[in-house]
Amino acid sequence: MLSKRAKYALNALVELARARDEGPISAANIAARAGVPRKFLEAILVDLRNAGIITSRKGRGGGHVLGKDPKEIHMAEVLRLFDGAIGLLPCVTHQFYARCEECTDEAVCGIRDIFMEVRQASVELLKKATLAEVLAREQRSRKRRS
Amino acid sequence: MLSKRAKYALNALVELARARDEGPISAANIAARAGVPRKFLEAILVDLRNAGIITSRKGRGGGHVLGKDPKEIHMAEVLRLFDGAIGLLPCVTHQFYARCEECTDEAVCGIRDIFMEVRQASVELLKKATLAEVLAREQRSRKRRS
DNA sequence: CATAATCCTACTGGATCAATAGGATTTGTT
DNA sequence: AACAAATCCTATTGATCCAGTAGGATTATG
């Protein structure tokens, strides 16, 4: 399961993508739109900022804005930032690799082999899942219903 | 990430599948082969037993045996047993479904849409990953190396 | 200078995890 | 009958992480 941090981060980013032409949006405002606790969200936004995913302006009239094109921000990046590895075993992740101590021969491990595939499939889908893509899908869903 | 419980369970099951013709195998024995702490493993084996994945015999000469054909035991089942949902959001899982409280309209949520796909891909792979399949892959890997 | 915003530090209660300890119970062997 | 080998049960522990709150320092704008 995703942590709430990660989920709230995604919600917030989608909100920022949707309101891209409104100029900077305050944490309180995002919190209200996304339906998440304000103070908690503030901490999350700091992380997003440190990662360069958003940029923030202090002071009156300040707020948060996407730091890149919505086509360049994908879910894999966000998940890794908040929840770490996407792979389900330490031995199948690229960015957070670690040996499984109990494993005698990684190269032959059938379990690993499976989880490699799972990881690859997941990463692939999550990389395609940019904010632009998410918004596009929401558009489509809305049309399909009307 | 998988919990250690889940990982150890998989390791133990593969060991049991591999030693299928040796009759019941004790927790201590499995622990030694799989390289996991004995006492911890005991608790895990109880869970596997309660789920009907293995059967256990008490007393001298007792031990644990697979409860079904290795072709019928797959990773999805084991993961669900120890770590719960496979889907990454409460709103995308079948067996452990829950609404996301902050979400206003699930049917339109683009985030959900993505994670549905990720879940489906993962479940599909994990269901194909039976113990028999794992052993077969290990055979292949070993051959490829010699 | 007032106000609205980000940002920083600290804390808390709760939950979960990984593991250990100790022993009760069951079963087969001699 | 006694012993040995096993599962099974209950409890506890220390560590770590999570979700959220609190309070205020800092910064920019009008």
Image (spheres, coloured by chain):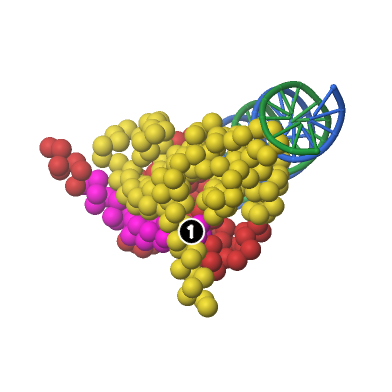
Chain colours: A red, B yellow, C green, D blue
Vertical comparison of D9 with B123: above or below: above
Q: Is residue A93 visible?
A: no
The residue at the point 14 percent across, 42 percent down is: A144
Q: Which chain's residue wears label 1?
A: B
**Badge 1 amino acid:** Leu
Q: Nearer the viewer, residue B100 or A21?
A: B100
Residue A68, x across and y down, in percent = 39, 62
Does B69 appear in magenta?
no
Image: magenta residue range: A110-139
| Vertical relation: A53 (above or below) A139 | below
Judged from this view, the residue extending furthest toward the bottom is B146
- Helix, strand or loop at label 1? It is helix
Nearer-the-camera pick, A27 or B142: B142
Quadrant position of residue B101: top left
* Residue under the image location 57 percent in, 58 percent down: A90
Asked whether residue A68 is in view, the answer is yes
From the viewer's perspective, is B9 left or right of B41? left
How many numbered badges does the structure rendering display? 1
Q: Which residue is mark 1?
A: B135
Q: Residues within 10 Å of mark 1 (few under 14, many from 20)?
A: many
Left or right of A93, for residue A104: right
Q: Position of residue C16 (x, y in %)?
A: 59, 36
On whether residue A118 falls in the magenta region, the answer is: yes
Closer to us: B120 or C29: C29
* Prevailing SS of the magenta stretch: helix
Percent of width and height locating residue A127: 37, 60
Residue A20 in the image, given as x and y percentages of width and height = 32, 52
Residue lying at 41% horizontally and 49% vertically, measured from the top left: B71
- Residue that appears at 62% across and 60% down: A103
